[in-house]
Image (cartoon, helix red, strand yellow):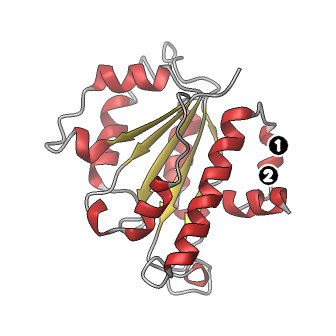
């Protein structure tokens, strides 16, 4: 059985993001992949909690796809997390709806990769900065996987954007079609690196 994938996309200025446009353009057309634009659906931040929970329940793999905003996510995605992942539904002694689902992030950031190191200008790795999301997933009994990250979006040429888009498509195709072992991601800071190694 193919995996069903839910992409929760949150970008308040999507029309200005060539990199995200390139990524989204390459999302495969499949009945098993749902692309859900939060800012398009909830321009006034009035998140339909029941609808969102039904979407989560119907999918096996969840992707939070968003730009890095002040070392976190845009405000609508934070609101989505606060409202949708309810106690008694997503976590707690009776919150069992998300157990075993796999989740990861697709991140775009203007900062170069070398910035996100202890010696770099941002002092922390992407993995360290995403720890609150990792912990959120763990509290909800989901499996949190390494992020797919596009760095230096202000400097990327069109050809490189297209390459990232094809890599993203390859990742989605693989995850849709394979019942993969979670252990294979251990030791990889980025999903991109794991996928490139797999394709070589």
Question: In this orientation, which residue lies closer to the viewer: 138 or 162?
Answer: 162
Looking at the image, residue 168 sits to the left or right of residue 11; the answer is: right
Looking at the image, residue 110 sits to the left or right of residue 37; the answer is: right
Label 2 element class = loop
* Mark 1 lies on residue: 183
* Mark 2 lies on residue: 186
Question: In this orientation, which residue lies closer to the viewer: 194 or 18?
Answer: 18
Q: Position of residue 7 (x, y in %)?
A: 47, 41
Q: Is residue 188 above or below residue 173?
A: below
Q: Are marks 2 and 1 in contact (CB under 8 Å)?
A: yes
Q: Is residue 108 above or below residue 42?
A: below
Q: Position of residue 106 (x, y in %)?
A: 52, 55
Quadrant housing the C terminus: bottom right
For this orientation, the residue located farthest to the left is: 44
Q: Residues within 10 Å of mark 1 (few under 14, many from 20)?
A: few
How far apart are labels 2 and 1 at the CA level? 6 Å
Instruction: Kindly identify the residue that appears in the image at 60 percent across and 55 percent down.
Output: 168
């Amino acid at each position: 059985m193919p995996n069903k994938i839910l992409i929760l996309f949150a970008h308040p200025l999507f029309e200005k993001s060539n990199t995200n446009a390139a990524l989204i353009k390459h999302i495969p057309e499949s009945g098993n992949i749902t692309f859900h634009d939060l800012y398009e659906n909830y321009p006034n931040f009035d998140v339909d909690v029941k609808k969102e929970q039904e979407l989560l329940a119907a999918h096996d793999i969840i992707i939070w796809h968003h730009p890095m905003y002040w070392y976190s996510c845009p405000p609508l995605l934070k609101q989505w997390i606060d409202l949708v992942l309810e106690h008694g539904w997503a976590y707690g002694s009776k919150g069992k709806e998300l157990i075993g689902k796999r989740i990861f992030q697709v991140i775009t950031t203007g900062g170069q990769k070398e910035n996100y190191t202890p010696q770099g200008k941002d002092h922390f790795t992407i993995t360290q900065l995403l720890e609150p999301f990792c912990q959120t997933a763990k509290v909800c009994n989901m499996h949190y996987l390494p992020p797919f990250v596009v760095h230096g979006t202000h400097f990327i040429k069109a050809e490189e954007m297209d390459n990232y888009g094809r890599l993203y498509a390859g990742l989605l195709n693989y995850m849709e079609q394979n019942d993969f072992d979670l252990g294979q991601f251990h030791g990889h800071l980025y999903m991109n690196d794991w996928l490139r190694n797999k394709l070589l």
